[in-house]
Amino acid sequence: MSRHAALLPILLALSVSAQANDDVAVLIKRQSQEFSDASASGDAKVLARYLDDRVLFMNEGGDMPTKKEIVDGAQPPANGMKNQLTQENFKVEVHGNVAVTSFTDVSTLQFHGQTVHAKYLSTEVWLREASGWKMISSQTMAAQDDPPETTLSVWALDEYVGTYQAGDFTYRIERSGDGLNGTAQGSKPVVLKAELRDVFFTPGAPRIRRIFQRDEHGKIIGFASRREGHDIVFKRVG
């Protein structure tokens, strides 16, 4: 037998395996989208069909409901509301009897005549069981967006200009044209935009807010750098 002839069964086996993985990937993508659809519409039957009894599930709020809690809590949207979840950037890797996915769920929520969009980043793990592929794990986090910007007058912006300190760490705020820049100690300046009066954010970093504090006379005395609900407090020193 020639060397090429000996390799032929191996190549055929690899080809069959690759085709099988492709077929599984298509199946998992369909089931995952159906699960998203069921989550948006409150279809308990579909949720029950695809969830493993021992699924480890973490939603975007950090809750970890059981299968029973997910299925029992499923219900159609209230009157005047409609939600649609469309998966984007779907990726799947098949490892024998396990398939791991990552994707973005794009939410379009109709709320009494208004439309709200949001994105959720998810990973799922599916296991091939006797009754078909079941979800054994899921984790989702909300993709945060920059908030709408509020325009403040130049006079109002000047109130925030100054030097602030947290211990021996210094933060300087300066006005640049009709906006503000913030410079952390030893770093490059970043743009500060007003979300509301006394609440500022940096475009591209929506997890952080700078919330300014005033004394009884209305004078700014410092700010809290707030991230995920936790504050680092800066006092105004100049």
Image (tube, rainbow, N blue to C red):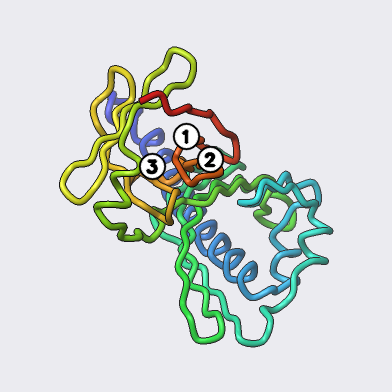
Q: Residues within 10 Å of mark 3 (few under 14, many from 20)?
A: few
Is the C-beta separation of discs 1 and 2 under 8 Å?
yes
Report which quarter residue 51 is drawn in.
bottom right
Badge nearest the viewer, 3 or 1: 1
Which residue is at the far left?
A: 177
Q: Mark 3 belongs to which amino acid?
A: Ala
Q: State the residue in front, 125 or 43.
A: 43
Report which quarter residue 31 is drawn in.
bottom right
Where disc 2 sits, the SS reads loop
**Residue 18: image x %, image y %?**
42, 45
Residue bearing the label numbered 3 = 205
Residue bearing the label numbered 1 = 221
Does residue 234 show up?
Answer: yes
Q: Classify the position of the N terminus by image quarter.
A: top left
Q: Mark 2 belongs to which amino acid?
A: Asp
Residue bearing the label numbered 2 = 215
Compared across the picture, whether 209 is left or right of 190 comes to right
**Residue 42: image x %, image y %?**
69, 73
Numbered badge on residue 106: none
